Amino acid sequence: MTDEPAADLAALGRAFEEIVTWLRRTRTATDISVTALSLLDRLDVGGDHRVTDLAALEGITQPATTGLVNRLEARGWAARSADPSDGRASLVTITDAGRARLREHREDRSRRIAERLASLDAADQAALLAALPALRHLTTAPAARPTT
Amino acid sequence: MTDEPAADLAALGRAFEEIVTWLRRTRTATDISVTALSLLDRLDVGGDHRVTDLAALEGITQPATTGLVNRLEARGWAARSADPSDGRASLVTITDAGRARLREHREDRSRRIAERLASLDAADQAALLAALPALRHLTTAPAARPTT
DNA sequence: TATTGTTATACTCTATAACTATA
DNA sequence: TATAGTTATAGAGTATAACAATA
């Protein structure tokens, strides 16, 4: 796009970090974390998941995931059940209350984005929507890391 | 872009959240947080800042910022100095060591992004770079929130 | 032996409330 | 009185290490 690919990479990286800040700064609800919401989203879209899988998908460790699921369970937003095919594993499910909370979050998130989008010009808006698939391709990477 | 603006908003929101996850999942250094790096970036690009300003820019409270600056100072990456024009205020500066750490981070971040970009097709790559200004316009919002 | 998950422990990050010092 | 910043305190989120149960 330009003749300075290194500068583009740096700018893209910084832009990503500012998205993090923006998400936090504009968040209205403080009763649930971004990670917890992301986890609920996965459970909603992808169905039951093992703790190990959730940890890998979210990029956090198993113990961290255990705690996160504990807190979600305490609030009635998720539930554990036994995995019939493996006595060691447990399956994490989203509850109806969890879906309701998630829906609320999605609406809030869309509202905030819509507000900002409205203040951009048509070219910017089009560019963002055109980049949507690319963003997903970029971040929905092949594999994950941490274990322990 | 499509005839389903609501779906676009939801997808864009989810894509942003997955950027958060991706940044965390691919991060190699665990000795410094995303917020701390973002703060160093601001100090590097924008020069000295008051604690209040940093708090507003990062979207965190003053006490949280105090702690963050304390930890950065303890590592020699930032320093405080008196504001000659206001006895109550202090100015936070990035140190040479802080700049070195920041440079390391930027290189690492660019490397990770380049790796993923390389696996995308030309259209995706172009779409991402074309959306860069729009991303900045979206997230570099007018004002900030928290105070206390 | 390897894998799944939890518990134990410690530190960072964040928030709210109360306080000090300066404007 | 209002503002800038810190301290006090509490809770969420994360990590590593050690463990129990199952494969």
Image: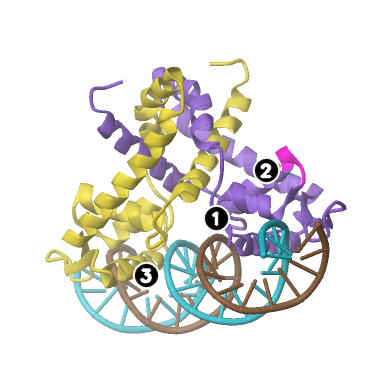
Chain colours: A purple, B yellow, C cyan, D brown
Nearer to the camera, A52 or A19: A52
Relative horizontal placement of residue D17, taking residue A123 as reference (left or right): right
Mark 3 = which residue?
B67
Q: Is residue A99 visible?
A: yes
Residue B51 in picture, x, y percent from top left? 29, 62
Residue B134 in picture, x, y percent from top left? 38, 28
Q: Residue furthest toward the left?
A: B84
Q: Residue furthest toward the right?
A: A84
- Report the amino acid beneath label 3: Gly
Q: In which chain is the residue bearing label 3?
A: B
Look at 56% across and 46% down and name the residue there: A144
Is there one chain holding both mark 2 and mark 1? yes
Comparing labels 1 and 3, the label whose residue is closer to the camera:
1
Residue B78 in picture, x, y percent from top left? 23, 64
Q: Is residue B141 visible?
A: no
How much space separates mark 1 and mark 3, taking CA atoms? 28 Å
Magenta-highlighted residues = A44-48
Q: Residues within 10 Å of mark 1 (few under 14, many from 20)?
A: some
Mark 2 = which residue?
A42
- Report the amino acid beneath label 1: Pro
Q: In which chain is the residue bearing label 2?
A: A
Comparing labels 2 and 1, the label whose residue is closer to the camera:
1
How much space separates mark 3 and mark 2, taking CA atoms? 33 Å
Look at 65% across and 49% down and name the residue there: A39
- Report the amino acid beneath label 2: Arg
Mark 1 element type: loop
Q: In which chain is the residue bearing label 1?
A: A
How much space separates mark 2 and mark 1, taking CA atoms? 18 Å
Is there one chain holding both mark 1 and mark 3? no
Tag 2 near tag 1, CB within 8 Å: no
Mark 1 = which residue?
A146
